[in-house]
Amino acid sequence: MADKVTGRIHSTENFGTVDGPGVRFIVFMQGCRMRCQFCHNPDTWKINGGREVTTDEILEEALRYQKYWGEKGGITISGGEPLLQPEFITDLFKKAKEKGIHTTIDTCGRPFTYEEPFFSQFNELMKYTDLLLFDIKHIDNKAHKELTKSPNDNILEMAQYLSEIDKPVWIRHVLVPFRSDYDEYLIRLDEFIKTLNNVDKVEILPYHTMGRYKWEELGLKYPLEGIEPPTQDRVKNAQKLLHVDSYTKYQTR
């Protein structure tokens, strides 16, 4: 009998409606190396935290809710950062696809590299992945480092690679006042997205403070103290500059 594939997760959610098409069963993986100032799940950062589960256990749990998914729903793997545990997700998605389940990964792309063994693992995972929710935190590398403690070079490389292999993506961008909410940055991001041929949808996610209490519970200083969510006018401005209405393939795919 083959060894069961295990991974470390933070939690699950049964009826996700904003993490991919339809109603989703969401698995929040444990572990992330980025330190986004606006992170609302800092309790997922610790690499060896959470609880250990097998892919069979997660699939069994997900299938309890399959009747609610409709034609477009399925399983979304979020985080933390899912790509830190590619073998676990590959095994889970392979089993899910055998049952005709739609599979989605919500990622910031930070672990991506063309180096081995990751690149081969990534390509194997893509065989069983229908969609990626791709979070581009900031288009400017210097500002990205300030916002997330990480550069964005390989993140943009991953976006380009996904375009090369024609893997469907929804680009997501968190709009943060005094960080990413500047027309100059938004225009540059728009220009980058236009170079990609696989973008089904572009979403602006307004920064919010709902995760602030988690920072306090962990004894961490909240880095965006005093910064309020963007106004509706600024959200609309970002949507206009990123031409979100032009990306409609998600409606028919």
Image (spheres, rainbow, N blue to C red):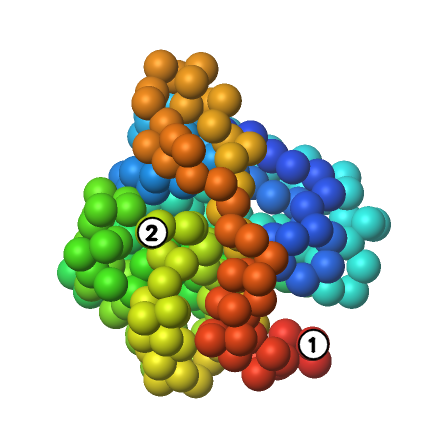
Could you say where residue 230 lies in the image, as x and y percent from the top left?
51, 51
Question: Viewed as shown, does residue 46 lie left or right of 234?
Answer: left
The quadrant where residue 59 appears: top right
Residue type, label 1? Gln
Q: Which mark is residue 251?
A: 1
Could you say where residue 25 lies in the image, as x and y percent from the top left?
66, 45
- Of tags 2 and 1, the one toward the viewer is 2
Q: Nearer the viewer, residue 80 or 246?
A: 246
Does dot 1 land on a helix, a strand or a loop? Answer: helix
| Residue beneath the point at 82% across and 49% down | 68
Could you say where residue 35 lies in the image, as x and y percent from the top left?
30, 38
Residue 120 visible:
no
First along the sequence among labels 2 and 1: 2
Question: Viewed as shown, does residue 155 lie left or right of 74?
Answer: left
Q: Nearer the viewer, residue 252 or 242?
A: 242
**Is 50 located above or below residue 140 in the figure?**
above
